Amino acid sequence: MVNKGLSEMNFWKIFFLSLIFLLFFQLIGQEKISVEIITQRALNLMENLSQGNFEEATGYFDETMKKAVSPEFLKKAWESLQLQFGPFQGIRGSRFETLAGYEVIFIFCQFEKQMLDARVVFNKAGEIAGLNFVPHLEVKESLPPAYANPDLFEEKEVVIRSGDWALPGTLTIPRNGGPFAALVLVHGSGPNDRDETVGPNKPFRDIAWGLASRGVAVLRYEKRTKVYGEKIREDRKIRVSFTVNDETVEDALSAVKLLRSMEKIDPDRIFVLGHSLGGMMIPRIASRDERIAGFIIMAGLTRPIEEAILDQT
């Protein structure tokens, strides 16, 4: 039932997420507003939505949001949420986190059928620069997967270098034997860490530990936009020329090159796994390095993105 509901709200998720992505290229130089103030503004936003005050709800929107999201659109989106998840019943709490240099307030919204988190993104001026609803996430301790055996592998800190960019990473490698087959893990969209952490989930870590328990070395690393998000946003020369090659492709190729230099890695058995955006970039990575032994596309689009968006609306 949850999955069906979430698929029905894909349009709204895509729309609001696209607004958040626009933030990446904005120049913001104002002084930071306190967490208490932006939390109250997020709460006020939800209160106005719940009371049908859609004009007032846009009061703290930045200029981009005001142009993209009218009070009428907010009204339709709010009504659509309640059709899917039942009447809004109240706010159950909030939490704060930073995302690529932006401050994000999650408001826990209880609907009749399910709790959702309103994710409200603020710029440094304390204006609302992004809004979307996601499944409520209880932040819990991330436990190791049952299929991993830590006695069979070890982890070493490494650095992936692409020109002037240096990214910290982790090599998970079996303790005994070698040379080993190896796998590079390439992130999806957004400023992901080396584990692709989402709440309590660490899928890249779990993959690395599971494969290393079975004799395969795995290299994972912090994404460039995770480590250098602030620098990319604030340096106009970097920002205007920054492409998906810089975000994803170059660092994946550098990770493969680093593995080839390691004594315990078989240079002819290096594979690349791309998740989501990383999966979309697999053909581009493959065209740049014919020595890579093979590729895995995990939940990546293998057709034009505009076709997928149309299918999901």
Image (tube, helix red, strand yellow):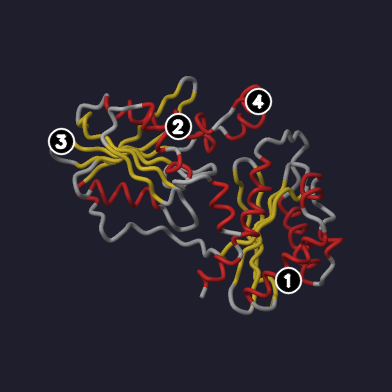
Instruction: Please tell me how many numbered marks the rendered image carries.
Output: 4
Query: Which SS class for mark 2?
Result: helix
| Residue 79 numbered tag | 1
What is the crowding at mark 1: few (fewer than 14 residues within 10 Å), some, or many (at least 20)? Answer: some
Q: Position of residue 268 (x, y in %)?
A: 21, 30
Residue on which the image places disc 2? 249
Q: Position of residue 150 (x, y in %)?
A: 24, 51
Query: Which SS class for mark 3?
Result: loop
Q: Amino acid at mark 3?
A: Gly
Residue on which the image places disc 4? 235
Query: Which SS class for mark 1?
Result: helix
What is the crowding at mark 4: few (fewer than 14 residues within 10 Å), some, or many (at least 20)? Answer: few
Residue on which the image places disc 3? 178
For marks 3 and 1 on the same chain, the one whose residue lies earlier in the sequence:
1
**Foreground tag (1 vs 4):** 1
Q: Residue at x 19, y 45 (%)?
A: 215
Q: Residue at x 66, y 47 (%)?
A: 20
For marks 1 and 2 on the same chain, the one whose residue lies earlier in the sequence:
1
What is the crowding at mark 2: few (fewer than 14 residues within 10 Å), some, or many (at least 20)? Answer: some
